[in-house]
Image (cartoon, helix red, strand yellow):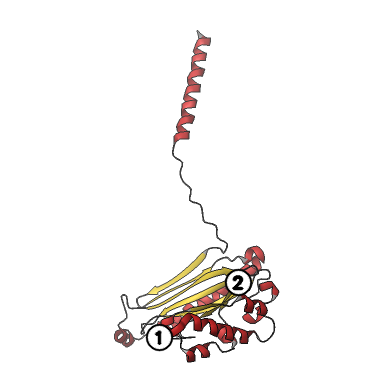
Amino acid sequence: MYPRFVSIAIVFLILVGAGLILWLTLQPKEEVPQAAPSATGSRKCVADTGPYHSIETCYPSETSLKRSAGEMADREAVLTLRGFTEHEAELFKKDYVETLADEDIEVIGLGGERIYTLEVDYEMYESSASVSYVYHGYVDTLGAHPNVYFRTFTFDMQTGQELLLGDLCVGTDYLSVLSKSSRELLRAALGENASEETLLAGTTPDAQNFQNFYLENGDLVIVFAPYQVGPWSIGTQEVHIPRIDSEAMLKAEYR
């Protein structure tokens, strides 16, 4: 009797175990969200709002330099980018918020949706030898229309050094080449909307006119903010310098 009872008990336990395993297998599995991979680290934004202003600035908490140039280069780049955004926020608040008087608030009609606004954000571009951060600032001080400005940062991928346009180029005539090439491309792009006087003034062979740039896949791109090369209505203009010109100007490692 006992051997038969033991056999039945074993069979019963096996069936129960198999049923439990089958039940667990058929249960829906919880989906675990996967973080999207990012070559540039996470974007960190800081907001400062009040009854008469709204400020939001963003910077990367990590750059691709961490992989190519090391942690020290990455930290220095992040500090540079973060420092820029903090400076812009502090300057805007000082100029448009901290000096407000009651009579200013009443005359301007500040409050509700009518507030001073600053938004500073960025886009990242990479080439084989560099990484660039193109910052665009949106400013609304309740004038005829909002305005936009730019500030670009380019870093050498191997050393982490911040690069100015002159660091990328060979010779001393690169500004003349950029001036001539930009004028031709802008005239073609703007057509009847071109203002020759403003276009010439904004593309003189002066380093300040070409200070906002980035490299992407070997292309040298110059960013012209509104008003620099034409009326506000034409907006921001980006000029991709032709390879035949950029290869003659750029150092071999940045082509």
- The answer, for residue 236, to whether it is visible in the render is yes
Q: Position of residue 43 (x, y in %)?
A: 51, 65
Mark 2 surroundings: few (<14), some (14-19) or many (≥20) residues within 10 A: many
In the picture, measured across the screen, residue 83 lies left or right of residue 101, that is: right
Q: Residue at position x 51%, y 75% from top?
A: 135
The residue identified by callout 2 is 77
Q: CA distance from mark 2 to mark 1?
A: 33 Å
In the picture, measured across the screen, residue 136 lies left or right of residue 251, that is: left
As drawn, which residue projects farthest toward the top?
A: 1
In the picture, measured across the screen, residue 22 lies left or right of residue 79, that is: left
Q: Position of residue 133 (x, y in %)?
A: 55, 72
| Element on which disc 1 rests | loop
The residue identified by callout 1 is 99
| Element on which disc 2 rests | helix
Circle nearer the N terminus (2, 1): 2
Q: Residue at position x 32%, y 81% from top?
A: 110
Closer to us: 243 or 112: 243
> As displayed, is residue 13 above or below residue 33?
above
In the picture, measured across the screen, residue 215 lies left or right of residue 148, that is: right
> As displayed, is residue 9 above or below residue 46?
above
* Cβ–Cβ under 8 Å for marks 2 and 1: no
Closer to us: 176 or 44: 176
* Quadrant housing the C terminus: bottom right
> As displayed, is residue 160 above or below residue 175?
above
Amino acid type shown at disc 2: Ala
